[in-house]
Amino acid sequence: MKLIGFQERAASQISRRFYEYIGDPLMVDRTTPIPFVQTLVSITGSGKTLILADAVSQIRDEMPVAPVVLWISKGKVVVSQTFENLSSGKYADNLSDFTVLPLMEVSPDHLLSADVPVLLVATVGKFAVEDTSSEERKVHRAQLDLAEESLWDQLKKRRTEKGQRRPLIIVYDEGHNLSDLQSERLLELAPDALIIASATLALPPRLNNVMARLRNDKGWEDDDFSTTVSSREVVLSGLVKERISIDGYITPMEPALDNLLGGLKMAKEVAQDHKLPFSPKAIYVCSTNTVDGISISEDLKRPFKERQARPILIWRHLVEVANIRPDKIAVYCQLKFSKESPKPIDMHLFDGGEKDYTRFISGAYEHVIFNLGLQEGWDDPACCFAYIDKEMASARQITQVVGRVLRQPGAEHYSDPILNTAHFHIRTDEKGVFDDILRDIRKDLATEHPSITLVVKDEKSRGKRDRIYPESSRTVPTVGIESSGALSPISQIVRGMMDFRGDANNTVGQGSRMQVLQAVGEDSDAQFEWVEVDHSSRVSARAVFRREIQRSYPGGLRRAGGPVNLVDIEDPKFDVMIELNSPAAEHIRQQARKVVEAYIQHSVIFQNDVDRPYSVGPVAIDPSSSEEFKRALHGKYSGMNSLEVKFARALDKTQRVWARNPVGNGYSLPLLHEGKAYWPDFLVWVDKTVVAIDTKGDHLLVEATASKLFEIDGAEAGKRVVLRLVSEGHVDISGGIKQQKSKNGFTVWSWRNGRLQPIHCDTERDAVEAVLRVA
């Protein structure tokens, strides 16, 4: 799977830091290293597994001996999905030369190879036990049919046929579950690296000694232990939803369910109207057998229609009141029934826990009733709505459920914000309880999902619109990158790339040596000593070329587009295997960078009058903080900063129709030199011209003028798009350096005849007039 820019940067940072450390690692004793420790902190839905897989692949490329990777997590469902994704699923190509196995299926032969990396997937339950002699823990027992020593002991030695000890990389997914006992067991293996991933993370005390050595002897600071992914980049990439809506109820269950179903119906209709390949779904989180005022045993004896268990009440409301077909509803919890009052035949109950998971996910269920047991591992991006019942209503539990609803279907934002929002309906007993929960949720979400907008509704605000349609139809021509002019220069660069097939000299690394522990002597009294190994692993020239393209043009490999698509990547000379520190690899990297330069130089941003234009859709607002506008296309907007508010009010005093352009799902323009897109703040229709306006504070001005102002080629007799940027104060830029002449007024920037043109204005009105002057 192709990585997005922030994913590649995170993976490269992890691997680069590891390689820098492993060249001169700290030691506990002669043969036991202090492991490299790195946490990957990234919000749910950001592609942590892909980042980790790519980091592991990059680490493998640099190592002279193929590593053993132990990939672990707490839940069986998570581990099962990970194994499928890494071995034959969507991430298999990212680990193409790895042998991927469940931990208990590894044989001694798998651990003997110095050339074939092996990745072993397991739950922590396979080894994290106080009593390692337990008959239940096969990993700590000898495999008499395969080896005389236990798998655990083999992992500790992990010796190749030549006696070299293979590097051990431990990856702990869902790392918030990491405990002291687990840390103790993992450190017994003398790993070379411990990489821990989670949306939030607090490392257990057992790792304090390891981290203290790294701080004291290597001078590491807090930032050196962590690779952090920007949540804003994740949101803008379209991988997760951009908005969380929380609706609180102090009512019976039924009104909350009805409101959820009303929103779900609307979202389904929007998805159908847009001909999207998914239909939104809903989950219902509740306790399983808890009953208000009635003992569980007494409730079991009641006829089904008189029972009060939450899953039954929710199921009946969906079937009997909302007329939802039972085959669209799954009940995933250990709901109990008696012989006297069995479950209805048409109720799809999955009460076997993880054993039922495969059967559950094979069904096309649109409504899923479950308790917290389904939280980790189940990820259906089409899940957009959630009901949370009062017994589950703690802030921590709710923020955990957020992750199940946060992923974005199709990994892209849509023109209607209802499909870009995670909708929560939370029912409690008392207003004070909801207020306390909401306070804690705000705190948690601000930490875990800082770039996702949070909107809260209650009895007073529930009837107010938080999604506003445009009052009239308005369109903007599509703008894209036309790269046909780059095809010939890129082809010439690739033709000029040297062919290293049959070259035994330039494909070998020069002057790079790494120490590896190796057994010296007979097996009976062998001792490990550090020896130097000359060469790193071999990778294909194609892999080196593609990775350098991605590093130089980070947005270019997402979906279609980018310089790599203009290269005949199947040319046989890309098949040659080379070492990463070889002259051949450096030559290929240079050619890849030249390809990116040629792509940027010979491509143009043009107005595409053939494709369907962008049509302004509805916008999301916060009813509690929105402002009304008379000439605006939507009538109300919220979430603007102080400069945007000033400019919006000035725009509204003109006779022009204008619109606030939402980031992520509004109108976007490509940035050719970055391979990304940006969303201007405002759109204004001036006769046959659409003016796209971006407002920027002083601290962002130099970057913005350098990247977001350019001429757009190709406009014909119809509408055309022009770009303007507005900043506060009278400012000039010379040689990339900002020169502040006055803090008063505004500066309007345009790009004309290949030059940046500033216009100084004293008032907002003057600035708006300058912006809208398009002749």
Image (cartoon, rainbow, N blue to C red):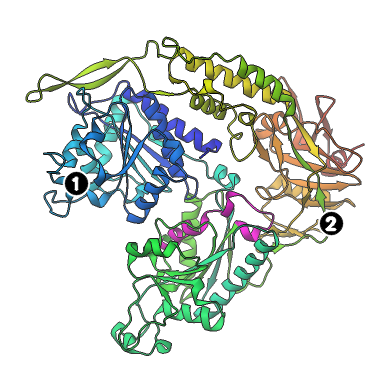
Q: Is residue 291 left or right of residue 51?
A: left
* Residue at the farthest left position: 524
Q: Residue at point 31% right, 84% down?
A: 338
Above-or-below relation of 76 to 100: below
Q: Position of residue 89 (x, y in %)?
A: 44, 46
Residue 251 seen by the camera: no
The residue nearer to you, when weighing 435 against 503, is 503
Q: Which mark is residue 631?
A: 2
Q: Give how far across and how far down residue 581 sits, in percent.
A: 43, 17
Tell me the quadrant of the picture where the C terminus can be found.
top right
> Along the line of sight, which residue is nearer the eye, 351 or 418?
351
Tell me the amino acid under the disc marked 1. Val
Q: Where in the figure is residue 101, as x and y percent of width and height?
A: 31, 43
Residue at 24% in and 28% down: 33
Number of other residues with Cα within 10 Å of mark 1, as a class: few under 14, some 14 to 19, many 20 or more:
many
Magenta region: 397-420
Label 2 sits on what residue type?
Arg
Q: Quadrant of residue 274 in the image?
A: bottom right
Say left or right for 220 vs 270. Answer: left
Q: Which residue corresponds to mark 1?
A: 139
Please say whether residue 436 is visible from this viewpoint: yes
Q: CA distance from mark 2 to mark 1?
A: 70 Å
Q: Main secondary structure of the magenta part?
A: helix
Which one is nearer the viewer's eye here, 285 or 513? 513
Q: Is residue 381 above or below residue 69?
A: below
Q: Is residue 404 magenta?
A: yes
Does the stretch in magenta take in 296? Answer: no
Percent from the top left, x then y, of residue 674? 64, 31
